[in-house]
Amino acid sequence: MRRPDAGDASPDFDVIVVGAGFAGLYMLHRIRELGLSVRVLEAGDGVGGTWYWNRYPGARCDIESFDYSYSFSPELEQEWAWTERYPSQPEILRYINHVADRFDLRRDIQLETRVTRIAFDEDNTRWRIRTDRETELSATFCITAMGCLSAPKDPDIPGLDTFAGVCHRTSDWPKDGVDLGGKRVGVIGTGSTGVQLIPTIAPQAGHLTVFQRTPNFSLPARNAPLAPEVADEVKANYAERRRQTLESDLGLPVTIGGESALAVSEEERRQEYDRRWQVGGGAFLLAFNDLLVDKAANDTAADYFRARLREVVADPEVAEILTPTTYPVGTKRLCLDTGYYETFNRDDVSLVDLRRTPIEGATPSGLRTAAGQHDLDVLILAIGFDAVTGAFLDADIRGVGGVRLADRWADGPRAYLGVAIAGFPNLFTITGPGSPSIVTNVVVSIEQHVDWIATCIAYMQEHDIERIEPRRSAEDAWVDHVREVADSTLFPLADSWYVGANVPGKPRVFLPYLGGVATFRRLCDDVARQGYEGFAVRKRSHRERAALMSGEGQQGSTMGNREQDLRDRAEIEDLLHHYCWLVDTREPDRLLDEFYSADAVDDHGAVKLSGRDEIGHFMRTLMEWSEGHAHVLSNVVVELDGDEATARSYVTAWHWFATTADQGDHRPADYTCVGQYHDRLRREPQGWRVIDRRFATTAPGYVALGAFPAVDFT
């Protein structure tokens, strides 16, 4: 594994992957199988991603170990021995390091390198990646594997910098740990991190004060060491277990109850809840088939939970503070714990309800709430993450035309299948917004996305495709679908980080896809099977062939030069491929054949198009085209069946692009707004002309309208 040094060059790769956790390591493995050059960039000084950074006491996965693991290698499945039902952070990190070593992944991973900008180079169809090491790398494909929970939320506590004690975030816990022995410790946050941390550190601290903003539903994990016979049985039937996982909603080998909670008697319902409570884990919410879609059904599970909580917590007032009442159970991330509620029966643990007495600010000696001062020696922030989108925005990603992803997502994240973003070609996002990711077994969702991305890149290689990105229409339809599925459930009733509610000012958009792992996989596979439906692709073969035709060093400048004609003809073929991209057809070669067979290309390579809609699409293609190709515009003949105003609009747009292409300026941000250039014609009429068709191939920058007589706009 390489670490950067001052002598590193700025190399070019086929693929750059950002992040070396579960997603980044598997993506690296798959890219190598394609025979492509690849570099993984990782900010930490070790692999592991989320499990590298989150080293806080008690950190543990809430998915069972046999399922929270890679499935791509049967040999790996058999050789690794998990020790607990729910793996701890140290064990997961050992597993990830074992994978890195077993598959020799380290040599292509660059550690201690934080990405500071990812920008698309339109001229070369490459991504330029800058790092905090003052280096720049480039790649045809950039794949983000940064994780859904990797951008820590900033604390909003006035005066925090004045606190004289020790302050740590759980998301960046010191490797050497923190001495809490006999100290006054405060913890802010009672989400999944807090419910693991609090019972672990309570016995160490002199006194622990828990500052709770919103109570969470936390179920008993019933964690335990794994008996050898249990491990043997799982390994003997791993293939069937994985099959069940892929056919499930959650990416787990579990089934949802077949009845409504309201269709059985109260006694039957109680017995089923009791059984699942004793088993432990999140399967409690799978007892009946309508707990997450019917509020009345959900109330039966929530009421059961509240009753069990009151049985555990001795002080009724403390139990009341800990009891969730403002949202349905399961609509915020469901927590699993070991002894969380029992911790509040300790004499050396205090609970502060921040809904009643909010924090007013930090002081040198602790925290001040509306109820008074709380003196502390150590303050621990377990306040969560800017989930799903935070890491993308931190990376300063810029797409076509220099558009910042932060601006593109100003009203909320938009992606197609959670894997790609319109306007950001050849950028793939593993478990991005709009994918199942954080509401499923994320390792299963990671493997599905990685496999899909690898297959897509292989398809591009096979079909000489240089560029791929979602169409806006497909992206919009997917975003709408994600919202519609969420709206059919109870999830929108909660102010959760699933909708960005934990980050002030963050747009409220439901981030994950709730349609389930199996459904999502089928949808993604269907998109690929249908030639990547919803994606715009551009081939490179014509341009490469044109370069060979023109010959090295040949710079023909007249339209009568045969080599120049061939080059322009190939460039026009590229434009027609791009045109097919815009008009939503995946058959550019068939369309090209029709143009040629209909004698739509003359001896000089000029292309004649008919029909206003067709012209509009083709013009938008030209305006999107890279600068430096104005000479080709002189070879395009437009035949319009429309009025003079339409003709003026189109001619203005064409001429405007032709005369500014070399400077690369004034390219329209929205390629659909052709008519806006008609207004510029009225304001600045000088120099605009329409010439007769017979002069179409002689004057670069002019466009002929065969259906109209010669018109002088001046």
Image: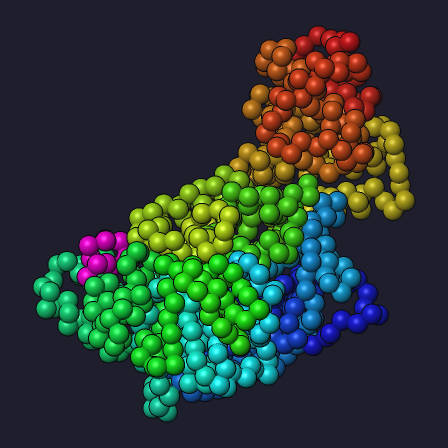
As drawn, 135 above or below 337: above
Q: Is residue 112 left or right of residue 172?
A: right
Q: Is residue 691 left or right of residue 67?
A: right
- Residue shown at the point (75%, 45%) measured from the top left: 123
Magenta span includes 614: no
- Residue shown at the point (59%, 29%) measured from the top left: 672
**Is residue 117 or residue 494 the one in the foreground?**
494
**Is residue 340 or residue 265 the one in the foreground?**
340
Q: Would residue 203 be visible to someone looking at this image?
A: yes
Residue 399 rendering spot, x and y as whole percentages: 65, 46
Residue 523 rendering spot, x and y as whole percentages: 42, 53
Residue 82 rendering spot, x and y as whole percentages: 44, 85
As drawn, 26 above or below 592: below
Q: Main SS of the magenta segment?
A: helix
Magenta span includes 295: yes
Quadrant of the frame with the N terminus: bottom right
Quarter location, residue 107: bottom right
Quarter location, residue 515: bottom left
Residue 231 rendering spot, x and y as whole percentages: 37, 86
- Residue shown at the point (50%, 66%) measured from the top left: 367
Q: Is residue 664 left or right of residue 22?
A: right
Q: Would residue 431 be visible to someone looking at this image?
A: no
As drawn, 590 above or below 464: above
The residue segment tinted magenta is: 291-300
